[in-house]
Image (spheres, rainbow, N blue to C red):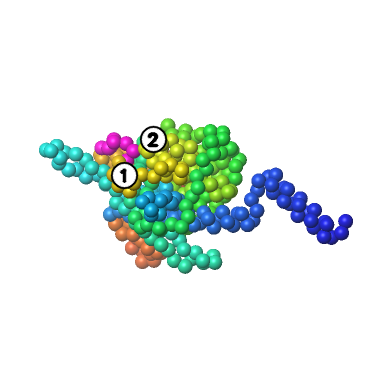
Amino acid sequence: MNASKLLLVVALSAFSINISTGAPTAKQVREVADHLQDVSVTIKAKSRHSSSEGSGAMIIREIDGKKVTFVWTAAHVVDNLRKVRSVIEKGSPRKIVEFEDASIVKELVERGRRVGEMKMDAKIIKYSNADNGHDLALLMVRATDYAKSGIEFNLSKSNDGIVPIGTSLFHVGSLLGQMGANSMTTGIISQVGRTLDKYEYDQTTVTAFPGSSGGGVYLQNGKYVGMIVRGAGEGFNLMVPVRRMIRWTEKNDILWAIDPTEEMPSMEDILSMQIEDSGIISNDEDEDEDEYSVKNAFPYRIKTEYNFNNKLLRGFDKSGGFEKELNTRPFNGMDIYKIDHR
């Protein structure tokens, strides 16, 4: 056998191995990685008393001839934007729940170098709290034509939508907040159907850190299979699987935010939706009383929150004016900031 024929046999053998195993080629991995970088954003939720950072994944839908960007994230990433105020209506007191806008930050990278960022305000249009809900939030970017591409959900109904244990996965999120924006990690599905506080999660070994909350988990072909919301270490993380997201969107008439074939409502209908998926408003005193036990529950929420006595530290403080003690659960010694990971 001459050299040219030998090279052809080797090439065909490699091709057949790739087809039989389903492993993506190097080119396919690069294309998927570039796409996931393009659809992933950092979520910044700054309120009067705290500022938190998490992750999000964008979708694009057309409304009234305009391309509108929506962002999926975890509710606990933006929970500090929730405000409750009392009003008097027809002589009786009533509580109104309102949300401030979050900031969506998209990193701009050219030839492997960060060249800037795009920052837009986003309105929270649907929210299910983390304490007794699904820990999901859907945001709408106020500017039209913001994103150029969006995620595609894995809508396969085979095996009831369950991704088999051992399946290789990617995660893209803002690990440690914006300083780790668009970090890409790998892992597998390590268990399915974990039940925590009556809700269903899938377990994954994709590496996640505080700030990963709200970030997408993807098959190697780039399809979205879940959202990271909790963790107990780099390789023990829980995600809300797409099958549970589908049930929640169906219940709240927003399946269009998962399935692009669903009919889109008008902008007027979207803006008039009830934001919270439950009409129950818990007592503020009860929230304060239970805050420690809820936020320290295992596995931990992995939002990154900065508390600086109403001051947001923008860089390394060397003056000694700020306490640099880490209040991290369970990740100790990871950063100089005083941060609350939950």
Residue 332 x, y percent position in the rendering:
46, 51
State whether residue 2 appears in this view.
Answer: yes
- Dot 2, how many residues are within 10 Å of its Cα: few (below 14), some (14-19), or many (20+)? few
* Label 2 SS: helix
* Label 1 SS: helix
Front residue of 105/150: it is: 150
Answer with left or right where residue 37 lies relative to residue 264.
right
Between marks 1 and 2, how big is the CA–CA gap?
16 Å
Earlier-in-chain disc, 1 versus 2: 2
At x 41%, y 62%, the residue is 118
Q: Quadrant of the N terminus?
A: bottom right
Residue range in magenta is 275-283
Q: Which mark is residue 285?
A: none
According to the image, label 1 marks what residue?
269
At x 40%, y 64%, the residue is 315
Residue 41 x, y percent position in the rendering:
44, 55
Front residue of 288/53: it is: 53
